[in-house]
Image (cartoon, rainbow, N blue to C red):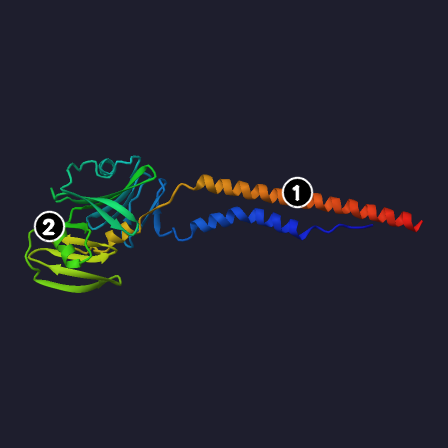
Amino acid sequence: MKTTSFPKSLFIGIVFLFLLVPAVQAQNRIGLDAFHNSPDGFHVLIPQGWENLSTQSYARFSNAGVDIYAASVPTEDVQAGIAQAIDLVLPDFDSEPSHVSQVILSNGTWTQQVYPASDEQYVTAYGQVYGGSTYVIVWYSTQPIQPVIVSEEDVQTGITSALAILGSEVDEPTSSETITVNEQTLTQNVYDGITATGRVRGGSTMVMVSTAESEINPTIFFTLLTDFFITPMTTPYLYLGLVATAVITIVFIGSLIIRQRNLQKDLQTLETLQAEGAA
């Protein structure tokens, strides 16, 4: 009695089909553990040592009187989106921005809105439009410390411009030095009652201005802003790819089965002709 061996290519196709989905899922998990991953499709780095108070509606990280929020709003009007995001995360905050500008970072162009200090509240917000929504990051502090970004590649000019945006009139700094924080080189200027720490990244100078001693790492906010990223809604394409792969695999397996049957028929025909020839 003749036995038929199971085709090796058929076995490989079945194994590939079963391994495809978990492989894709594992790939999506790599590298995202350090981020807050919003259901709205944006991701923002969780600062080390900060309390993560995020909700389903927005991200929130808190440390020593400073809160950083991130949210998305379904509008392409960036200023309206920033206003709606601030209403969401800071419902009691009521102020108009004193400065609005466009800043270019490594992850695209953001609209910056700087708000005047009032009642010991220091707020700066950034908005970016993508795919029909406005994504917003808000700095809120009860400490006298506030971030500003200016489109300037000279750090000293950038620091001076940032101070002017905040309404601080200063002369020459009493001291200026280069410091290293978390392996990042920063320029720190000390004025009469004001400390401004800045660095150039890309074509912009990022500045953190403080009128009191603070334990907040001056690079935290700018790191969050530049590490903020948006994932396009690719789930339908993923499912389409899985379906297409499954169909191709099924067709491939079906073709192998049909070819196997045809070979068996051809073999039987040859055996019959051989037997008739011998007779």
Does residue 17 appear to the left or right of 61 in the view shown?
Answer: right
Residue furthest right in the image: 279
> In this view of the protein, which residue sits in the foreground, 122 or 77?
77
Label 2 close to label 1 by CB (< 8 Å) = no
Amino acid type shown at disc 1 = Gly
Residue in view at x 27 percent, y 50 percent: 225
Q: CA distance from mark 2 to mark 1?
A: 73 Å
> In this view of the protein, which residue sits in the foreground, 60 or 43?
43
Q: Is residue 64 in sight in this rendering?
A: yes
Residue in view at x 8 percent, y 58 percent: 191
Q: Quadrant of residue 177?
A: bottom left
Residue 254: image tag = 1
Helix or strand or loop: what does disc 1 sit on?
helix
Q: Quadrant of residue 85?
A: top left
Residue 63 position in % (x across, y down): 23, 50
Helix or strand or loop: what does disc 2 sit on?
helix
Q: Circle 2 sits on which residue?
A: 164
Of the numbered discs 2 and 1, the one sitting upstream in the chain is 2
Residue in view at x 16 percent, y 36 percent: 94
For label 1, count other residues whose C-alpha is less than 10 Å away and answer few (under 14), some (14-19) or many (20+). Answer: few
For label 2, count other residues whose C-alpha is less than 10 Å away and answer few (under 14), some (14-19) or many (20+). Answer: few
Does residue 275 appear to the left or right of 183 in the view shown?
Answer: right
Residue 22: image tag = none
Residue 261 position in % (x across, y down): 74, 44
Residue 114 position in % (x across, y down): 17, 44
238 shown above or below 209: above
Amino acid type shown at disc 2 = Ala
